Image: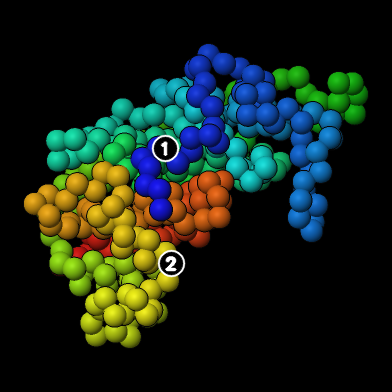
Amino acid sequence: MEWTNQKPWDGLSVDINPNISPREMVFKVKLDSEKSWNPTGGVRPGRPKSYANQEMFQFFKSFTENGGLSLETIGTLDNGRIVWGLAALKEEFILIKTDEIKSYLMLYSRNINRDIIEIQFTTFRQAGGNTLQIPCKGRTFFKNICRRPFTKQFPFISLKFHKFDEGLIRKTKETITYGREAIIDFSNNAELLINKKVNDEISKRYMFDVFQPEISNKLTSIGNKEVNELADKKTKISLEAITKAPGQNLVDGEISAWDLINAVTYAVDHCIGSDQDSRLRLGWFGPNSKFKQRALDLAQNLK
């Protein structure tokens, strides 16, 4: 297996200038032609150019700017069905002298009508190239007020964008504040995880608890025999990642709860999935994101 610390979205995104227009963003990620999904699967390209993606990027841009941020990366997944953007937050921290963690606001749309915009906050660990979604209170989705209604007369669509009013600006700032507070709390918890040392059996049970809890609950002890006979691919990859994944610089050869959670997030972002697109889609927005959250919860509760 090839171990890499590149960003999991490299090759699936473009970095943008903060002054770029929503229309230019559409062309940057090649969404200038609307895609139509067949009920049985697959994509039919070639319909007239859609304004929905432009209006989605208008919301991305307005949300970040009203929150005092700048959209810096945009990308697509699943043939353009999912569109996302990242804006860096100022909350950064360094653990064990060189383990640098950055944080981002992510906006994304999984609705092809682009009338609902979802948000989440995520950290990015530079040493390992792995991400972790940080749960926080506050809103997780917004109605896209930038979507323009169609009209019966040429040009058949309203020429005016709705702007963020005072109420929406207040909600935007409040949501970003909640995210920042959650990331600060996470940084404090990460320090505790580093100092929480675990032995080999606890590490093995932890991985079973994350990926195969139905088996873990039946075992009184977990050693190499149980791993060889019962562990699935996800569990085995994550166990290997504890010592082999980039950034896993075990202090004095000891494994910490911090090493365990980073092994899981690395495996989800870089190893589990048929290709890079599916890994990112499943790890950010799909069922594999639950593995990351379970890993965080379990690491915090380790004795």
The residue wearing badge 2 is: 233
Task: Decide which of 228, 99 is in the foreground and name it.
Answer: 228
x, y percent for residue 23: 67, 20
Toward which corner of the image does residue 291 lie, by quadrant?
Answer: bottom left
Residue drawn 22% across the image and 38% down it = 99
Q: Determine the CA span between mark 1 and mark 2.
A: 23 Å
Residue drawn 33% across the image and 85% down it = 218
Specify whether residue 249 is in view.
yes
Residue type at mark 2? Lys
x, y percent for residue 160: 71, 20
The residue wearing badge 1 is: 7
Q: What element carries label 2?
A: helix
Q: Residues within 10 Å of mark 1 (few under 14, many from 20)?
A: some
Q: Compared with residue 302, is residue 263 higher up or lower down, i.e. above or below?
A: above
Task: Decide which of 88, 185 is in the foreground and name it.
Answer: 88
Q: Is mark 1 on a helix, strand or loop?
A: loop
In this picture, residue 234 sits left or right of residue 50? left
Toward which corner of the image does residue 101 lie, by quadrant?
Answer: top left
Residue type at mark 1? Lys
Residue drawn 45% across the image and 41% down it = 8
In this picture, residue 188 sits left or right of residue 80? left
Q: Residues within 10 Å of mark 2 (few under 14, many from 20)?
A: few
